[in-house]
Amino acid sequence: MAITKTNFINYSRCPRYVSLDDIKKEKLQSMVTLEEYRKEEEEEIIKELLGDMYDEDGNDLIDTKNEHLEVMLPYYNMVEILAGNLAPKYFDGTFKYSKSTKEQESFDAIIDGIRYLCYVDIYNENDKGFNIIEAKATTTKKYIDLGCKVDGNFNSIFMKDEKGIYRLLEELNVNIENYMPKEKYDYNKAKLFDKFSNAGHYVYDLAVQRYIIEKDLISHNEKSKLKNVRYYLAVLNHEYVFNGKYDCGEPVYETDDNGNEIVSFIDLTDVTKDYMDKIDLDRKRVAGYINDLKADEVPLGVYCEIKKMTKCKYSKICWAKLPAKNSIMAYIDGHHGFKDKDGNKYERFDLINDGYVSMLDVPEEMLNREKNVIQRRALESGKPFINKNKIIDGIKQIEYPIYHLDFETFPCPLPRYRGEKCYTQSVFQFSLHIEHAPGVCDKEKDHYGFLAGDHLDHREELVKLMCELIGDSGTVLVYNDSFEKTRIKELADIFPEYKNKLMKIRSMIFDLMNIVKTKSSLYEDLGYDKEEAKMFNYYNASMTGSFSIKKVLPIFSNLTYQGMEIGNGVEALITYANFPKMDKLDFKHKYEKLVEYCKQDTWAMYCVLEGLKKEVGLNMQPN
Ligand code: SF4
């Protein structure tokens, strides 16, 4: 099989990947059909898509089965079609796009006995030359966010030209210094060349595409054409707001009220040109790995992309030398490295490759962050770190009744309902446990909730019920409040008739994580000095560096998510995504399981709060 773009990107990780991938050397010159190419790309596409949809700790995603995730592929394919439909607004000439036509343009070149091959998402030919447009279901945000604030205003290194295509400032007739200091510009532009950064990932992909295309043209004596090829990414516009128009039940993504299109084009011709020498080096490395095919252990590195959606599929083999719990990776902020007493810095990967794989392997004098010292003490002693006073003072801020609230959301790449943007965390379920007085809450009788049973717009029903259930006094308790606060603000903007009540609910939110972890401003307001205010309130070695509720819950309760049919946020959203495909019986079963899962999330908060009270000896009596 020829080396496709996806293979190339993976093979350039390290020599071991290539040998583990069981390459058949004798087939390295053969062709790959569009169908085979798409199949191979699908796995990567799904991972990328979910990486954009779900940016919490990626572990939930990594273990989700691919057949369940395939439900997301149509959304991805739609991005390609939307980009193809919009392209004629920006480019002249003829177009070839959409996998359904089975006519995608392909390029391939044989170099040193290996065939490299790519298919082009949108191929646009005009009288000057041709444009290569790669559609990605990511958003402009990753690119526009590259920049800095000047005089209180954020300026990006990208700006639209007169046609509405994003280009780097240096390619437009402007003085960069008017937008940001040159060194800031260069610093942000450099991120485009880091293939492991959010924005650089797609730029590298496009650069590999360019490399193969150029080699193809050169091998066909068409070098003169090179200067007339331009390279673009087509990505979802993060500013686009869907107006709620449908045709036969399908959303119509026409220009929004602010003149935004749903897809934006980013010209990366010059950036990918600067990448060519690097890609050539990578290509030589890959060819060397294929020649040697050595499965020997290699140093672990950033290319393993551990803890990311794009993590290497062989990480289970290579990373087995690290303990499953409390490895060096569990040190909070460990990605900044460690310093010895003389100020010498040691990168985490260097330490791992030198054999410092467990938390306990790292010499104590290198733990220059107080929180890491706390982690270490908790692990060594087997006793939790606890600041009782802070926990007690935190709990005292909570007023009764407590409304334990949790949302489940579907961050669809394409907006589905009025007022939504691409990847809006669209709320389809809420769960609510009402604790009337300290400890007075029944898991079943005091539970309320809403779950949309199909993909129609049920947001107003959900909002209405939530507003009816939550009173005007007490505390709305959530875990990690920025998520729920943002969702409620979005719903308030979409449903003005509920705005006052929703904003009231929002003002009642208190974050339970602030009691477990901390929140500097809260504890400074309560009279703690800066240092104590910012330090953890609680840490137990079983948390292995995470304050997620799934890690905290087992410490304070016997309640567990283990064995639940739907046991994490990704399974919840994938189940909801699959609703329309289920038969009646399956739907009924899954619906109940989803209700059960969301109920568990709010009951977990109740249990954690009870556990914390017990831990600090806070005996709160029902009023
Ligand atoms: S896990 Fe890391 S070292 Fe192992 S094959 Fe993948 S990239 Fe290479």
Image (tube, rainbow, N blue to C red):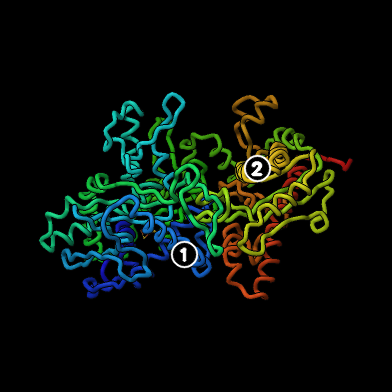
The reply to whether the residue tagged 2 has its Cβ within 8 angstroms of ligand 1 is no
- Identified at 69% across, 59% down, the residue is 451
Is 585 left or right of 470, judged from the image as shown?
A: left
Give residue 579's quadrant in the image. bottom right
Report which quarter residue 573 is drawn in.
Answer: bottom right
Instruction: Kindly report which numbered mark, 1 or 2, lies closer to the viewer in this rendering.
Output: 2
- Outermost residue toward the right in this view: 623
Q: Which of 133 and 398 is in front in this view?
A: 133
Question: Left or right: 219 with respect to 84?
Answer: left
Which residue is drawn at the image coordinates 61% and 62% (left, top)? 455
Q: What element carries label 2?
A: helix
**CA gap, disc 1 to disc 2?**
31 Å
Give the residue type that dot 1 points to: Leu
Which is more toward the observer, 422 or 260?
260
Taking the spot 63% from the left edge, 47% from the top edge, the residue there is 382
Is residue 381 visible to us here?
Answer: no
Q: Position of residue 209 (x, y in %)?
A: 27, 57
Neighbor class of circle 2 (other Cα within 10 Å; few <14, some 14-19, many 20+) is some
Q: Label 2 amino acid?
A: Ala
**Residue 121 found in image quarter:** bottom left
Q: Disc 1 designates what residue?
A: 73
Residue 181: image x %, image y %?
33, 27
Would you name the residue on which mark 2 appears?
492
> Is 554 rendered above or below residue 500?
below
x, y percentage for residue 27?
24, 74
Which residue occupies the foreground of this view, 515 or 371?
515
Element marked by disc 1: helix
The answer to whether any part of residue 247 appears in the image is yes
Q: Residue at x 55, y 42 (%)?
A: 376
- Marks counted in the figure total 2
Is residue 605 toward the left or the right of residue 520 in the image? Answer: right
